[in-house]
Image: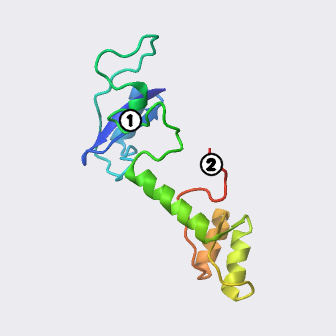
Amino acid sequence: MIRYALTCADGHRFESWFQSASAFDTLLKSGHVSCSLCGSRDVSKALMAPSVATDRPERSGAPAPDEGSENGTAPAGRPLSTPTGPAEQALTALRKRIEENSEHVGLRFAQEARDIHAGLRPDRPIHGEARPDEAIRLIEDGIPVAPLPFLPGRKRN
């Protein structure tokens, strides 16, 4: 596996792992590599210094491990669960708002949504999980649902 620092035409910087250098080239040429922030497929490798573990502290003027880096990665001393960029912060805020203002009904989502739509259950905002075929049937039946960009109700690491 190889990790590349990447940059899109809009200047967004991000990292991604690839099976090999040739796998990256193949995926890039076929249009399967895109910016994680804006979706642009005009992506190129950014200059990246190798990360080498040593017993001595940094003396080259590079940031200390807890200062982070310019490529948008999380500082070494910061928990991975802390959002790093605007997109991640927006998703975290969306998740918090949904979880605070709706009821998690878990795997009963499709049935609960049908019952609310039919007036058999009280009208209220809900979130949960549904199989793809169940979600498609809800939409085909005119029941307003939307996918969430995260798995609801699961414990976050």
* 51 versus 118 height, above or below: above
The three-letter amino acid code for the residue at tag 1 is: Thr
Left/right placement of residue 63 relative to residue 65 reads left
Give residue 88's position: percent from left, percent from top: 45, 51
Q: Residues within 10 Å of mark 2 (few under 14, many from 20)?
A: few
Q: Residue 26, which numbered label?
A: 1
Screen quadrant of the C terminus: top right
At 32% from the left edge and 26% from the top edge, which residue is drawn?
A: 48
Residue 148 seen in render: no
Percent of width and height locating residue 36: 39, 47
Disc 2 + disc 1, Cβ < 8 Å: no
Q: Is residue 97 left or right of residue 40?
A: right
Q: Which mark is residue 156?
A: 2
Res 53 visible: yes
The answer to which image quadrant residue 73 occupies is top left
Numbered badge on residue 147: none
Looking at the rendered structure, the kind of residue marked 2 is: Arg
| Number of marks in the rendered image | 2
Q: Earlier in the sequence, mark 2 or mark 1?
A: 1
Quadrant of the rendered structure where residue 11 is? top left
Disc 2 is placed on an element classified as: loop
Q: Is residue 108 above or below residue 45?
A: below
Residue drawn at (50%, 56%), measured in percent from left and top?
A: 92
